[in-house]
């Protein structure tokens, strides 16, 4: 896996990697709940199953938005020094 290898190469990243791994385990559990609820809905269409799906999707959205907000706050806000070039339009530069 990438994260443990990253932690091994740079032990100072330990707390960050631990947090990322915990976040990924949590998201995996939420996705498992969504999948299980969706599979249950195929067998029996009921209000309680639909509520489980909506609740799990809401929890996933809340957690992912919080994760992204945290990640975005760690990104430098200065303009990049290099220019991005698209490989799909013949090497034309993207506007800055």
Image (tube, grey):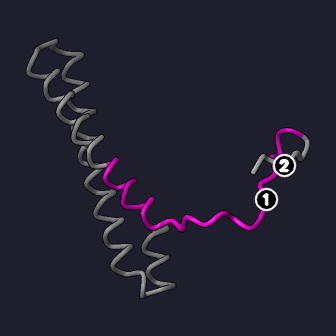
Q: x and y percent of residue 47 in the render? A: 10, 16
Q: What residue do we see at 21% from left, 36% from top?
A: 56
Tell me if residue 67 is in the magenta stretch. Answer: yes
Q: x and y percent of residue 73 in the render? A: 42, 63
Q: Main secondary structure of the magenta part?
A: loop
> What residue is disc 1 on?
83
Q: Residue furthest bottom?
A: 11
Element type at marker 2?
A: loop
Q: Nearer the viewer, residue 49 or 61?
A: 61
Q: Residue furthest top?
A: 45
Q: x and y percent of residue 11 in the render? A: 42, 87
Asked if the residues shown at circle 1 and circle 2 are in contact, with their CB atoms under 8 angstroms apart, the answer is yes
Q: Which mark is residue 93?
A: 2
Q: What residue do we see at 66% from left, 63% from top?
A: 79
Q: Earlier in the sequence, mark 1 or mark 2?
A: 1
Element type at marker 1?
A: loop
Q: Nearer the viewer, residue 61 or 70?
A: 70
Q: Residue furthest left?
A: 48
Residue 11 sits above or below residue 36 on the image: below
The span shown in magenta is 64-89
Q: What residue do we see at 40% from left, 53% from top?
A: 68
Q: Quadrant of residue 3?
A: bottom left
Question: Label 1, label 2: how many angstroms apart (C-alpha)?
Answer: 7 Å
């Amino acid at each position: 896996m990438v994260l443990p290898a990253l932690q091994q190469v740079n032990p100072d990243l330990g707390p960050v990697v631990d947090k990322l791994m915990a976040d990924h385990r949590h998201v995996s559990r939420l996705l498992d709940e969504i999948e299980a609820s969706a599979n249950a809905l195929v067998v029996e269409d009921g209000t309680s199953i639909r509520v489980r799906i909506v609740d799990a999707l809401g929890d996933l959205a809340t957690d992912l938005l919080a994760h992204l907000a945290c990640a975005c706050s760690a990104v430098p806000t200065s303009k990049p020094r290099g220019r991005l070039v698209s490989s799909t339009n013949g090497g034309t530069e993207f506007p800055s």
